[in-house]
């Protein structure tokens, strides 16, 4: 036969189709020549697209190996396969934005083979049973993820829930802080009035209790008004007010709860506790107790509140975390540079208490207290940024705190406006109205060293508004816990904080933590510091917010920047 070895054409009028040598598996089928050629071309051409084209002809569901007339095998995918290829047992590699796994229903790759996609267009939407598209345009349907693999959409949901909780907690904290300041101001006024009233009553009580001395030294011509003026000056001992009356006065003046912590009731807790952001610790206002009069703050024995020192006590059931914070305070305050952190008074492990649920179940960190934090100050100024001396004082304090941390070979990881308080300053209302910063902020000090980790270590938590892009990408990629910390992390946070202070608004103002994290991960993300009014400060913040960690200044370069040298930095600390 002269046509032997060649494929046979099938004419439209043939009653029976003859066997094709090239495609021996196609038997006894009545099809037109053009239809057969279309089926062959559709099934056997190696398409470069990962989304198989729609097919209208069905010859079964299983792929087959077809023998050509030259003896070679050609893989033909199932002609019934429609829709994108399916990837199962998949993993997402965030550093490259790619997905790898076992493929099925691919136009050119046999079922069960491994596949690695090109970079995915929207990493945040990657989830099981969803179709994803790569930047090159290919589409895949994702089946079940590999065990232990990171699912970005699930992580984004968790981050969003965490962000909502943190946002609610922050809103509550600011409201409580505002309420606390108002209550303290009101209590101070009431205490002053009560103390004055008690002081007036005390001479009368003393005179009534000791009638004998009165007539002996009273001159006949003395006026009745002379004695009351002299008596308070002559009798200023703790006996002026009855101890029970003093306890009652102290409770109302300082909002004492009746709860004590520390050996022999050393500290008196007052007011309502504030929740430490996202953690189990609670922060209390407290006072050192008078050793001679239980339940009364020290130096309040005559009813005068002016000499009483307010303290802050952090009580935490997480022994490991509070031990770490205590150790960090010791390191930075004993280092080459002590910085401007609040003074740590005492650390008590498994602290005794007269309250059963606290006794021996929590540990206490006693520190210097502050009147308000910089976040609360900015909120009260309603968008008005810090200026002049006030801005410089805050910037210097933050820089010197970082200097103390870095010189101790540590990384703070949580530098933000909430973690800087103003101490020994009752001029909150005046600071709010100080538009040009002429009053300054000399009492700014850093707090909260719970998240401080050694350089080269791994973070234990993070704040989206303070973390740099390189960490945000690691976090979204599922390996945030393995991120290696460097000083450049804090320099980014410092730039973000100065931007907020100098413009009156956070860089990502009113954005949720999950959105902030996603923005930091975006390839097109660029920092814009054009809203910073001062030229030198704008340059400094721009350097701190460099997307390349190595291009950010170290803390020495930060403190030597022209912004400080031209605005009156004051005595150098290095």
Image (spheres, rainbow, N blue to C red):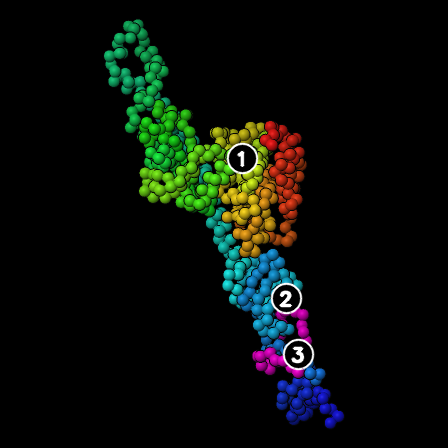
Where residue 540 appears, as percent x and y from the top left, is 64, 38
Residue 380 or 528: which is nearer the viewer?
Answer: 528
Magenta residues?
41-67
Sequence-first disc among 2 and 3: 3
Sort mark 1 into few (<14), some (14-19) or many (20+) by Cα contacts within 10 Å: some
Q: Residue at x 55, y 41 (%)?
A: 410
Residue 454 or 90: which is nearer the viewer?
Answer: 454
> Magenta span has 62?
yes
Sequence-first disc among 2 and 1: 2
Q: Quadrant of the C terminus?
A: top right
Sort mark 2 into few (<14), some (14-19) or many (20+) by Cα contacts within 10 Å: some
Q: What residue would you read off at disc 3?
A: 74
Residues tagged 2 and 1 counted as in contact (Cβ below 8 A): no
The disc label shown at residue 559, or none: none
Q: Helix, strand or loop at disc 1?
A: loop
Q: Helix, strand or loop at disc 3?
A: strand
Q: Residue at x 55, y 36 (%)?
A: 404
Where residue 137 appears, as percent x and y from the top left, is 65, 64
Residue 217 or 178: which is nearer the viewer?
Answer: 217
Q: What residue would you read off at disc 2?
A: 138
Q: What residue would you read off at disc 1?
A: 335
Residues tagged 3 and 1 counted as in contact (Cβ below 8 A): no
In front: mark 2 or mark 3? 3
Tell me the CA gap for discs 3 and 1. Answer: 72 Å
Q: In the displayed structure, does residue 160 sit left or right of residue 559?
A: left
Q: Residue at x 28, y 19 (%)?
A: 205
Magenta segment, principal secondary structure?
Answer: loop
């Amino acid at each position: 036969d002269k046509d032997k070895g060649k494929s046979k054409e099938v004419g439209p009028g043939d009653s029976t189709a003859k066997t094709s040598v090239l495609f021996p598996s196609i038997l006894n089928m009545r099809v037109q020549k053009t239809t057969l050629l279309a089926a062959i071309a559709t099934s056997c051409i190696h398409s470069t697209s990962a989304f198989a084209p729609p097919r209208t002809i069905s010859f079964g569901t299983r792929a087959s190996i077809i023998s050509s007339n030259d003896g070679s095998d050609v893989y033909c995918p199932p002609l019934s396969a429609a829709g994108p290829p399916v990837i199962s047992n998949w993993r997402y590699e965030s550093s490259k934005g790619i997905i790898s796994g076992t493929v099925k229903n691919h136009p050119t790759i046999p079922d069960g083979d491994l596949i690695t996609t090109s970079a995915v267009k929207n990493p945040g939407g990657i989830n099981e049973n969803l179709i994803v598209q790569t930047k090159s345009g290919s589409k895949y349907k994702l089946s079940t993820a590999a065990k232990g693999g990171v699912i970005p959409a699930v992580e984004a949901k968790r981050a969003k829930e965490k962000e909502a909780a943190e946002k609610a907690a922050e809103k509550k904290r600011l409201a409580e802080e505002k309420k606390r300041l108002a209550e303290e101001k009101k209590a101070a006024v009431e205490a002053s009035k009560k103390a004055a009233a008690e002081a007036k009553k005390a001479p009368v009580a003393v005179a009534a209790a000791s009638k004998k001395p009165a007539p002996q030294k009273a001159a006949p011509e003395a006026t009745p008004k002379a004695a009351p003026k002299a008596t308070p000056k002559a009798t200023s001992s703790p006996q002026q007010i009855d101890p029970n009356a003093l306890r009652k006065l102290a409770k109302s003046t300082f909002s004492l709860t009746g709860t004590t912590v520390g050996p022999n009731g050393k500290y008196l807790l007052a007011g309502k506790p504030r929740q430490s952001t996202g953690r189990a610790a609670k922060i209390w206002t407290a006072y050192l107790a008078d050793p001679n009069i239980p339940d009364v703050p020290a130096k309040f024995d005559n009813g005068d509140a002016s000499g009483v020192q307010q303290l802050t006590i952090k009580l935490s059931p997480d022994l490991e975390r509070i031990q770490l914070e205590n150790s960090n305070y010791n390191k930075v305050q004993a280092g080459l540079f002590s910085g401007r952190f609040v003074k740590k008074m005492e650390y008590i492990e498994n602290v005794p208490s007269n309250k059963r649920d606290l006794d021996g179940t929590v540990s206490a960190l006693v520190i210097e207290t502050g009147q308000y934090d910089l976040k609360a100050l900015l909120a009260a100024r309603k968008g008005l940024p810090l200026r002049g001396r006030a801005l410089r004082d805050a910037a210097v304090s933050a820089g010197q705190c970082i200097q103390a941390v870095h010189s101790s070979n540590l990384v703070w990881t949580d530098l933000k406006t909430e973690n800087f308080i103003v101490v020994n300053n009752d001029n909150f209302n005046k600071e709010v109205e100080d538009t040009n910063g002429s009053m300054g902020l000399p009492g700014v000090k850093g707090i909260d060293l719970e998240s401080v980790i050694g350089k080269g270590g791994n973070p234990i938590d993070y704040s989206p508004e303070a973390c740099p892009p390189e960490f945000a990408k690691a976090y979204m990629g599922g390996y945030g816990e393995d991120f290696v910390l460097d000083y450049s992390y804090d320099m980014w946070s410092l730039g973000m904080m100065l931007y907020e202070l100098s413009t009156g608004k956070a860089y990502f103002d009113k954005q949720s933590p999950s959105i902030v994290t996603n923005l930091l991960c975006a390839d097109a993300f660029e920092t814009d510091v054009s809203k910073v009014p001062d030229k030198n400060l704008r340059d400094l913040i721009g350097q701190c917010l460099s997307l390349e960690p190595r291009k950010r200044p170290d803390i020495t370069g930060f403190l030597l920047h022209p912004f400080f040298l031209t605005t009156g930095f004051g005595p150098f600390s290095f």
